[in-house]
Image: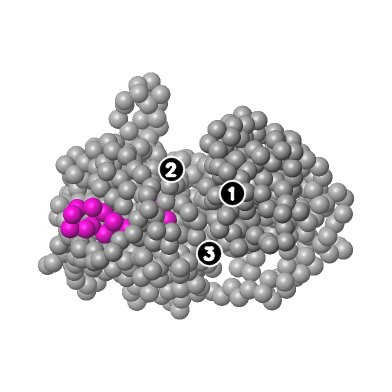
Amino acid sequence: MDILKKLKILSDAAKYDVSCSSSGSNRKGKKGELGSTNESGICHSWADDGRCISLLKILFTNYCIYDCAYCVNRASNDVPRTAFTPDEVADLTINFYKRNYIEGLFLSSAVYKSPNYTMELLTSTVKKLREEYRFNGYIHLKAIPGSDKELIEKAGMYVDRMSVNIELPSDEGLKLLAPQKNKNAIIKPMSFINTRIKQALEERQKFKHSQSFVPAGQTTQLIVGATQDSDLKILKLSEALYKGFKLKRVYYSAFIPVSNHPNLPALTSPPLLRENRLYQADWLLRFYGYSADEILSDEKPNFDLALDPKCDWALRNIELFPVEVNKADYYLLLRVPGIGVRSAKRIIAARKFGALSYEDLKKLGVVLKRAKYFITCSGKHYGIKNMDSSEIRNSILFSSSTNSSILDGEQLSLFSLYPQILPTNDVISTITGEF
Amino acid sequence: MIQYIYDGSFDGLLTAIYEAYYRRELPDEILSQDSPQQSLFIEKIYIETDEEKAKRVYTSIKTKISEFALRNCFYVFLSEREDRGTLIYKYLRLGWKVGKEIDQNLKNDIVLEVHKIRRQVVKEVHLLLGLIRFKQLNSGIYYSQIEPDNNIVGLLAPHFAERLSNEYWIIHDVKRNIGVMYNKVEWIIRDLNITGDIKLQDNEEDYQVLWKEYFNTIAIKNKINPKLQRQYMPKRYWKHLIEK
């Protein structure tokens, strides 16, 4: 089979993996070698679905011994199958990289023959890229659940990031849709990778030239909407993963029906709005200091699709508002809907030069049509008369329904709702919102 | 009213600011000589670029205000906005008054404007680090064309000098007829005009076809969203992309 056809099949099979980030690694280029990595990551293009293309995202092979109902590569699915050779992957990566099409490689695979066999193929490919082709760019490698930890250990020395996909948020879900997999086989490599990352960091402090191990950390992915799991359950799982395994990111992927398996829910379109709410809540966990139990509860285990989770939280805790922007500390400012990380930092910086007025806030990037209900400026309140949560809710929903059309089934832009989080190495630049 | 006219270089602008201080004049505008905003009815003073004077202003910004402020000035300069000279002048006058704290005073309209422009420049640099597309010429050189809003070839060069340190490459700003060239050791910026055909390496088109195939395959068909795509990757950059 020619390389063009292979690329088509094996990138088509990889496209449902959400992660394409090339961030978290900051490796300088070496004279005479090819490649470097950039701490904040670089997008090289945006596909027609609006997703960023940063890495060459391919499967090594789509031959699979598993038959997971949600997956397009399941053994019983009638699709063309093929496999790359390590040299083909290396040649594509190198030549795409030199033309600046990509930031590096994201290599994953279906499970061919056995988990160990597949993991060995992946490891030998990344080893080849690093040692024979002297490739110094970004590599994200999928760890195959069920493979020996010695193999994962070896691979981790060559790559920037590793991920193990949880896919389904609960054991019941796995039993129903992926009976050949179990939660333990997924959690075990994650726990192992986390231990090794920590160990490598400690060694790094003692010896300058110690071997690195997955310097950009590990991530995972969850499919949303293929099982009956509630949003609370998913969010709790993410929280546990961030705390327990120090994950860099949990990605959420709205389930796209790829088969008519009787155990799968009937969906007309992927639950994209729900996916977006999960990302917003995920942001609140990681950068705003919220806990999963604050965002959702057993009485209300699913997101309000009409309102973002931060606004929803504020309305349920309306007695804490309004807050005075000229006095409130950073963490309280962060809790105000319409004030993000960037604008909160700017407020703190700017108010040293005198009290801020309502107009000043607009200049600093505060979204006033949201924030006005929850703040006072030098004692003056610009929202509606009563601090009544249902009245404020109606008012917010009314004003947002008139000028934007959020439809279920539309890909939503996350970054228009929350500011991009910036590296904190440069204090002034963070305050002023520099990249 | 007084307008200062400088030669369009960064040193020229700094010289103009030097003169404004030592002549104790308060020019209302500082304009580049090619600026159409020059008025017949306003008194104009032509500033002769002087490296020594420029250097003194440069050092003074760095030590009396901050390095961050100096970078801000340079980025605003690279934005090529009509009013950049005047804006930088106003920003610096404020900076010499309040010192390094200036960049925290985000209520101030001048500071706010400077930061806004800086962000636009930095954003375009970051975007182009990804969107530049090299083609391999039959001489082996990797060659790319860009048409950025801001004059940023010099800000792009260090990244590629590090990344493609073992290749010859050229980034050609065809809008400004300048280019940055790298010879495996160092990079330089110079005037650049290419006449005649560009001859590509034999397998160059094969990789372009592979890339286009990849680009089309990777999009999820039930999520097609051209609006979002354009929001991240504005259409004016598509001309030099292989995949669009």
Specify whether disc 2 shares its chain with disc 1. Answer: no
Q: Which of labels 1 and 3 is toward the front?
A: 1
Q: Residue furthest top?
A: A206
Position of A387 compared to B237: left or right? right
Quadrant holding the N terminus of chain A: bottom left
Q: Determine whether the residue tagged by mark 2 lies in a helix, strand or loop.
A: loop
Residue with the mark numbered 3? A413
Which amino acid, by three-letter code, is at mark 1? Answer: Tyr
Residue with the mark numbered 2? A39
Question: Magenta part of the protein: which range?
Answer: B128-144
Across and down, in percent, residue A433 comes to 60, 47
Which amino acid, by three-letter code, is at mark 2? Answer: Glu
Residue A45 falls in which quadrant of the image? bottom left
Name the residue rendered at 32%, 70% in the picture: B216
Name the residue rendered at 66%, 39% in the picture: B19
Foreground pick, A117 / B203: B203
* Chain of the residue that carries numbered disc 1 in the rendered image: B
Q: Which of labels 3 and 2 is toward the front?
A: 2
As drawn, B53 above or below B189: above
Q: Residues within 10 Å of mark 3 (few under 14, many from 20)?
A: some
